[in-house]
Image: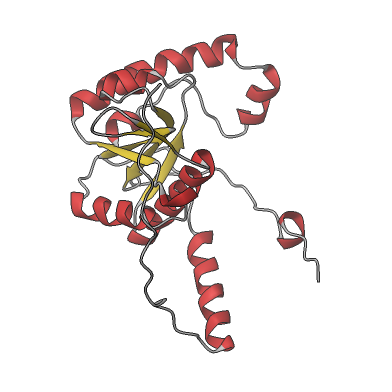
Amino acid sequence: MPRPFPSLPRAEFTSLSWEEKPVDEMRAAARAFLETMRGRRTVRDFSDRAVPRDIIESCLLAAGTAPNGANRQPWRFVVVGDPDVKRRLREEAEIEERAFYAGKAPQEWLDALAHLGTDEQKPFLERAPWLIVIFAESYEVGADGSKAKNYYVTESVGIATGMLITALHHAGLVTLTHTPSPMKFLNTLLGRPDNERPFLILVTGYPEEGATVPKITKKPIDGIALFVE
């Protein structure tokens, strides 16, 4: 059996960096952020305009501040800008997508997607300047080969992904979440180890000029929340 990691020393603590805001200022900030996020839309028509790498790095560092189980930080972001790798990724993804639309997916699922107009063609995987392939690390491997289990992996990576989408939108970019199934080909294509499970592909960049999005509505507060007071 692999040797467990040695026990970690107790963390040092520092003062919380936080300043209380007046309630009116909090209310205004919350409403302003709501309006900002209401402008966020999933986009499928991407421009090939370049996006500086440092902008993506800052957004990834913001995602890396996400809360997570035992501070294990079990996310791995593989950022793909190489045209050849993007082409091969698209080819592999479309193999899975063709199988999905040709009968692998139940009709109920296809019916639910119909109003969005999606199909097996995924040109955005080549056209967008950056593909951020997100992996969830189930356990960490030490330098000596020993293993340490990560905790609340799916929840932690999901939170970090949401924060990444938000950071990219805040920076002025658009995104698309893409989840071909299965996604194991990503490990092979990108040289990732078995302890990393593909979570999703996040496509990001500028929208194509004249890009359109479906007319959809979001549920009101009483459709998504219940207050117990």
Report the residue at 71% width, 55% height from top. 224
Number of marks:
0
Residue at 25% x, 52% y: name it: 57
Q: Quadrant of the N terminus?
A: top left
Q: Position of residue 31 (x, y in %)?
A: 56, 74
| Looking at the image, residue 160 lies above or below residue 171 | above
Left or right, residue 1 beside residue 156: left
**Image quadrant where residue 27 sits:** bottom right
In the image, residue 41 above or below residue 81: below
Between 40 and 131, the residue placed more toward the observer is 131
Residue at 57% x, 34% y: name it.
116
Q: Quadrant of the C terminus?
A: bottom right
Whether residue 25 is visible: yes
Residues 223 and 186: in front is: 186
Q: Where's residue 188, x and y in %?
A: 30, 18
- The answer to whether residue 52 shows anywhere in this view is no
Locate residue 183, reporting x and y percent. Answer: 43, 22
Image quadrant assignment for residue 194: top left
